[in-house]
Amino acid sequence: MVCEIVTIGDELLIGQVLNTNQAFIAEKLNSIGIDVGRMTTVGDSSASILQAFEEGMQRADIVIVTGGLGPTHDDITKKAAARFFDSELAPNPELRTRIEEIMQTRNIAWTQAAEEQTMFPKNASIVKNPIGTAAGMLFSQGEKPFIILPGVPYEMEAMMEQSVIPLLAPLVHGSVIRHHTLRSSGIPESILAQKIGPLEEILDGAALAFLPSAAGVRMRITVHAGDEPSASQKIQQVEKRLLEKVGRYVYGTGNDELEQVVGRLLADRHLTISVAESCTGGALADRITNVSGSSAYFERGVVVYSNRSKTQILGVPDELIQLHGAVSKEVAQAMASGIRSVAGTDIGVSTTGIAGPTGGSPEKPVGLVWIGYSDRSATLAIKFNFGQFRLNTKNRATQATLELVRRKLLQID
């Protein structure tokens, strides 16, 4: 079965609001074996909405719409749906009772807007909204379900999970779609693909997508199968073949974040870590401490932005900075060993670089970052160039630092 998703709202078209509804709905539909054939976004125009409805009905087995069910003048989806399905809008007693209960609970007086939300197409069924006042609608055009939900993400998500998926799941037979994502770091997409090589034997009918970002490359495996055991078996086979090729770069699966993986490695080994940051300005410590339980292995982090702070807090010799510059292999190493010594931890790491857009030179361009690492057996620093964009440089530097720690803990070269 194929579904078309239609999202409505001028705010989506002008980029004022990120359209997260499409992704959530698609993920939920895929989980029960329904493909998404197309996603369409239109503005708050009756003509555009009606055209999207018509095209969706022609192309897909199921249409799911979000947006425009609120009580304000620009919420016109309900009226457009009534027109499209040739249905009169009339007061709905069930909706009135539900809205009255909500407004009484919130101590809000009855308004004309509330009255408007009691109006409902006569030939539609109610899709209950467990959170808000805007009810969803279910129309049946022959065998095709046509479902309209509010655009407010948390309301739509609750309705998808509690009502829509249970409604649609029984309609799917002999079709399972499963996705499995491997998360990699420290290798560009093109080199990753080169190392994997020809895909035919690896995939054996499955699909593989490369999804690059500043944090790394996600490899999404997609399998269509007749049943859950077959889909799971195929995913395991493909994952095994990919790991044989590029396993050293893969740090996790699904929603794993690198700071979570590194945290588990540190906790399992009963090791502690401290960080000294210059160019990342505390972003590395922030990521590490985003993980619940990080106090078991994270001792401290310091932001040593100035040369004076590097010397006063970490003991980096001023002569070293004068000789090599703050952004250098030597200073990165001294920062890493300095924080390890000051904090008394098993591992110390450091970041020093030129995030830009100013401050670069031909010898030390914008994007240059040295990452230092120190433990009881070795102190080293690795050179990176993360490009021209300041925030990307900071983000990529924190990712590269965590990846360096992961590889050291796992003894991966």
Image (cartoon, helix red, strand yellow):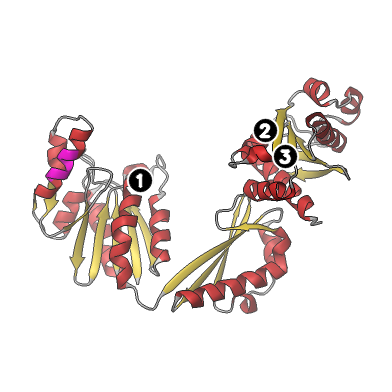
Classify residue 344 as left or right of residue 192. Answer: right
Q: Which mark is residue 367?
A: 3
Classify residue 236 as left or right of residue 140. Answer: right
Quarter holding the N terminus? bottom left
Residue 396 picture quarter = top right
At a point 86% along the width and 27% down the height, the residue shown is 316
Q: Which mark is residue 347?
A: none
Q: Please state which amino acid type lies under the numbered disc 3.
A: Gly
Q: Please state which amino acid type lies under the numbered disc 2.
A: Pro
At a point 38% along the width and 59% down the height, the residue shown is 39
Name the residue that disc number 1 marks: 154
- Name the N-terminal-most of marks 2 and 3: 2
Cα–Cα gap, marks 1 and 3: 39 Å
Q: Which mark is residue 357?
A: 2
Residue 285 picture quarter = top right
* 94 vs 12, nearest the viewer: 94
Query: Residue 155 location, x and y as percent?
Result: 31, 46
Query: Residue 343 location, x and y as percent?
Result: 78, 31
Q: Can residue 99 be found in the magenta stretch?
A: yes
Q: Please state which amino acid type lies under the numbered disc 1.
A: Tyr
Q: Secondary structure at mark 2?
A: loop
- Where 146 falls versus 407 (above or below)? below
Which numbered mark, 1 or 3, is in the foreground of this view?
Answer: 1
- Label 1: how many residues lie within 10 Å, few (<14), some (14-19) or many (20+)? few
At a point 13% along the width and 33% down the height, the residue shown is 110
Residue range corresponding to the magenta coloring: 96-101
Counting labels gives 3
